[in-house]
Image: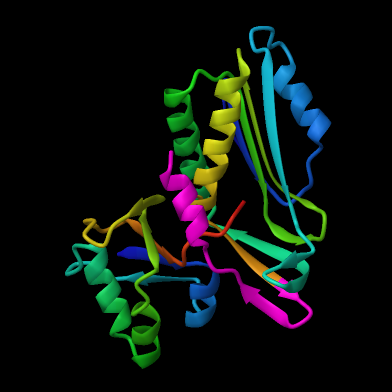
Amino acid sequence: MTKNSDTEISIQAADFNLADEVALLEQYNAIDGAVVTFTGRVRNQNEGKKVTSLTLEHYPGMTEKSLAKIINTAKERWRIGRVKVIHRVGELFIGEQIVFVGVTSKHRQDAFAANEFIMDYLKVQAPFWKKESTEQGNHWLDAKTSDENKAAKW
Amino acid sequence: MIKVVFFAALREQLNCSELSLNSDKLTTVAELKAELASKDEHWQQVFANNALLSAVNHDMVHNEQAIKPGDEVAFFPPVTGG
């Protein structure tokens, strides 16, 4: 876990609790009126195939560094307060939480924009890879051009 | 020496997660890649994939990035987290 004053990054196998994360973003934080959170979960189908689970691999060390850079860029661009990013690794089943991005700001626009920015860049820059298990077998997912395009729009 | 690490589909294709290379003559990521590809036909085929990404000391870099002894260089497919 990487922690500095108002930014926290956690790569973990364990699940997380949304209410606990929101409480931490709000605790001793009277200046921020907005809390925007995003949670990503494992879907039951992908590209027409029935998914049974996903296995997440990452590059320890680079993952944290890359997320810290993305968050720093967001902090330069928007007036935001606290940022928390959690990304789970290992095997995750249908409906399980994969990723959490929480951002606080004085007013909602900054937190909304920064949250989406962090998520869009996480998708194309943070070194995570998903292996999908379906009824037809296992395979590594291909990166999507639509994700590249979305990040490039910022 | 240079530490080289591989991830995800690439790691499986090469059946190798990490190796060390004598780096005296290797000055860029591109040269390192060519050296790895010269190992055998299979490695050559795998490294012919232009979509592969590289990182030096945990920063994403281009092929022309300079490398030096003690660096950790990583190769991996485009990322798919989130």
Q: Position of residue A27 (x, y in %)?
A: 74, 15
| Stretch of the chain drawn in magenta | A133-154
Q: Position of residue B3 (x, y in %)?
A: 37, 64
Relative depth, front residue between B48 and A146: A146
Residue drawn at point x = 40 percent, y = 81 percent:
B46
Q: Position of residue B61 (x, y in %)?
A: 32, 54
Relative depth, front residue between A129 and A151: A151
Q: Where on the picture, by quarter, is residue A90?
A: bottom right
Against B54, residue A11 (above or below) is above
Against B4, residue A19 (above or below) is above
Q: Is A142 covered by the magenta stretch?
A: yes
Q: Is B3 covered by the magenta stretch?
A: no
Residue drawn at point x = 79 percent, y = 79 percent:
A135
Q: In the visual, does B24 lie left or right of A150?
A: left
Q: Where on the picture, by quarter, is residue A115?
A: top right
Q: Can the viewer see residue B15 in this picture? A: no
Coloration of the structure image: rainbow
Name the quarter where the N terminus of chain B is drawn.
Answer: bottom left
Q: In the visual, does A1 lie left or right of B38?
A: right
Residue drawn at point x = 57 percent, y = 37 percent:
A116
